[in-house]
Image (cartoon, coloured by chain):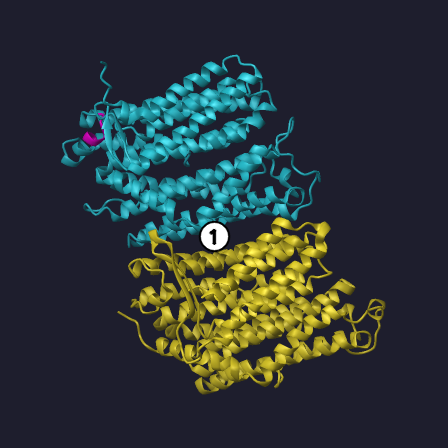
Amino acid sequence: MIQMPSWLPVVYPEIFLLLMTSVVALVGVNASEKRLNLSYVIAQISLGLLALLHLNELQLAKTVYAMQRMVVIDPLGHLLAMSAALATMITLGFARPYLASRDLLKGEFLSLAMFALLGISVMVSSNNFLVVYVGLELMSLSLYALTALRRDHAVSTEAAMKYFILGALASGFLLYGLSMMYGATGTLDIPYVFDAIHKGTAAPQVLTFGLVFIVAGLAFKLGLAPFHMWVPDVYQGAPTAVTLLISGAPKLAAFGITFRILVEGLSGLATDWQEMLIVLSVVSMSLGNLAAIAQSNLKRLLAYSAIAQLGFMLLGFTPTVINVETANAVNGYSSALFYMVTYVLTTLGTFGLVMVLSRQGFESEEIADLAGLGKRSPWIAGVMALFMFSLAGIPPLVGFYAKFAVLQALVSTGNQGYIILAVVAVLLSLIGAYYYLRIVKTMFFDEPLDPAPVQGETAAVVLLALSGLAVLGFGLFSDGLMTVCRDAVLKAFST
Amino acid sequence: MIFLNLAIWLPILAGVVLLALGRDDNARTVRWMSLVFALASFLVTIPLITGFDTAQAGLQFQTNLAWIERFHANYHIGVDGISVWFVLLTALITVVVVISAWEVITERVNQYMAAFLILSGVMVGVFAAADGLLFYTFFEATLIPMYIIIGIWGGPRRIYASFKFFLYTLLGSLLMLVAIVYLYIQSNGSFEILAWHKLPLSMTAQTALFFAFLAAFAVKVPMWPVHTWLPDVHVEAPTGGSAVLAAIMLKLGAYGFLRFSLPIAPDASHQWAWLIIAMSLIAVVYIGLVAMVQTDMKKLVAYSSIAHMGFCTLGFFIFNALGMEGAIVQMISHGFVSAAMFLGIGVLYDRVHSREIAAYGGVANTMPKFAAFAVLFAMANCGLPGTAGFVGEWMVILATTGYNFWIAALAATALVFGAAYTLWMVKRVYFGPVTKGSVSRLKDINPREFFMLAVLAVAVLAMGLYPKPFTDVMQASVDELLKHVAQSKLI
């Protein structure tokens, strides 16, 4: 009798995903339209099952290590992996009609998207620096290839090149920083790195030197200023379906590795990295919000908005553990997690809407293309308005409660510096409100150029309605998700 | 209690229903449905006043449910003697506004009506909220429908006006958000506004809180010198928008002083009372003079609103019962009078399509019924005894005389200026010979317009002749508030 390996019950969602990805890839090779439909259905069903598996594990709320403690399975990992699976499902749902009408729906799209998701799942449950890196590269390489999906399109190709070169540079930074950590502590396992730093046996200069590279690498991946140069170009250049993919699940992964590396591994250096994060965050919010004002391209505007939003999210990482007192830190990180999950939800809806508005041979990418949408298709415009008000942080939409959660985490430290930081953050988000309002204005107050109603695919329109409802529903009833986020972070701390 | 919940959620649900079902080809049905919904929303507020226990100072008709347990925020609503009248005022004005839009709004009727119904529910929510986060949620949520109302149905510069309105008020309220978060932390994780009232705070903290709240409420009231958004917005907003803005939204700011600034930071309020009094007096005197030189009727009424709201803030910060009650009465009466003034201008604008005073003259000859109403409301606006406008102003001036004679003397000039700019406008618009062709072709008000103005006229006269029910209801709560404000909370 063959004995079941001990890691199988721990990582079975990832194994399942790997298997199904291979199936989707095989079915989708050189496929006819019918076979492609089949592989799409298989992909969606397996993603749905994957989300359920993670949900099931999330409810069990266990923390288990496997594969010589290379991977850790805890509620935080499951929450992020589940959200990423759902985000990928939504992405595929929006992407299918869009890609099909442009002859871009090929087997590669589905399988690469699922490989990216596999990379994300690996990243969020890694307990070892090398595993982080392996997951990161699996995700990134899939995304580089997807960006170049429209290969006869100059802007797309340029975006893909830029993404690849800067992404490789960022990975290099991260790898270099991680190797410094290895040099200083003699281990790649995150908990041992943590111990080594706390014992004070590691050389502080090497640690700090490595930390700078790690933070820079993470900032690249999160798209934070001043490491944000790729974000606007890639968002604008990639086919909108791929932009949607890039702006969704990978952000969750970036959150995951930021948490795993900085909090679980390097919290001994928190005084160093929290200052760097404050600078990154304030610069991102200022630059993102100011640059977004000048944009006329909707995708580019949303890219700058992403920079600003992630800057705000990062504020949640700045209150840290003070003398074993973890309350402030848990409060901050769980607020950041809530912010991230709800931001991804909103941004998926927003880009999904951009795709619904596009038709064959017409990319609805300019803000001006939205003119008069309130008259043409009041429902779609209404949902977009919900997204915009949510991103601007107006209650009762979820974006407000996310901002509120982060602000209260800052103020609850009782430190005057953090209160000033909170005031700066709200003032910068006031600037942000301007360009979100401008989109609402274009939709509702301007006259339409083309009075015909939008012809959206039923599936995409239903998805859009659901995301709109979610943005409103998670706002009015934010308690459930907030509690899940807090419990996940608490659990990650208790081990 | 069910009625207060209905007063909030019935209009909001009605708005959602209208958004879902209404189209421009069934505009007639949409109008009737809106009217029925608005009337129903008003009727459910009546038990709040008939069942009100005037002996009790605290909150009545309370509902307290867990909302966001992670932050110990509750869905806690209730009304006291101060807020209950505003709930009724909001619901009543919404009925009037729905009637006023009847034939005027022909495009996207369902969206227009839905925006006003949702706005009405949200504003009732502001007056009813007893939880800080809930208050902020309602307070900010008012911006969305108002922004849409101004932007879609407004005048030529509506986009500028809608942005100015949104960003100006958002700036103020964001600072209030930080203050609310600070109070939440200081009170060890509680959002109960009443718990914040008891919270001892140092002078530095109180001063910071006082100014953070001032930023939000002064913009909303609006007080001089942050009043500049109001004239721009009023001029561009559609008639209904102006009416709701002047009648209710400005009161949200004044109400905020009573709920937050005074009881939470009493020591800072006493210390900085001179500043508020000075700002109020400037509003009363200087803005009164500015109103006099306006050539646009809506702008004139907008400036007159600022001057009248100056009386409210003056009444709050002289810390006595008469002044405070007078200020609250002034808030309610200004709700009726300003709504009526803007609706009156709307009646003229619908016919002549001009808001310029110079475009009219001798309207009383062609529209005698309308002119009668207009003169009544103008008299109420200058504070003629027997109308609602008199009671509040007189109470505030009387109370101020006990506080400081010279402040009272300055405030009393408002009666002179108020009479001057209002009557001068009345003279130029309604009296004299008819010289303009457009005026000679005017038709008098139809039954719908008559009804809508009559409702407000009855309210203005009733409140002017017999204000006792209003003051009786608020007395216990005002006394309690003043007792609270008189005690130092310093640590």
Residue A155 % position (x, y): 56, 24
Q: Chain of mark 1?
A: A
> Of the residues shown, which amino acid type is indicated by label 1?
Pro
Q: Quadrant of the C terminus of chain A?
A: top left
Chain A color in figure = cyan
Residue A194 is covered by the magenta coloring: no
Closer-to-camera residue (A53/A200): A53
- Judging by colour alone, the chain drawn in yellow in this rendered image is B
Return the residue at label 1.
Answer: A396
Residue at the location (38% across, 19% down)?
Answer: A19
Question: Left or right of B360: which side holds A63?
Answer: left
Residue B145 % position (x, y): 57, 55
Closer-to-camera residue (A166/B473): B473
The quadrant holding residue A45 is top left
Residue at the location (51% across, 76% down)?
Answer: B50
The quadrant holding residue B374 is bottom right
Residue A178 % position (x, y): 27, 26
Question: Left or right of A454: which side holds A429?
Answer: left
- Residue A429 sits above or below residue B125 on the image: above
Q: Which residues are magenta?
A: A188-193
Q: Quadrant of the N terminus of chain A?
A: top left
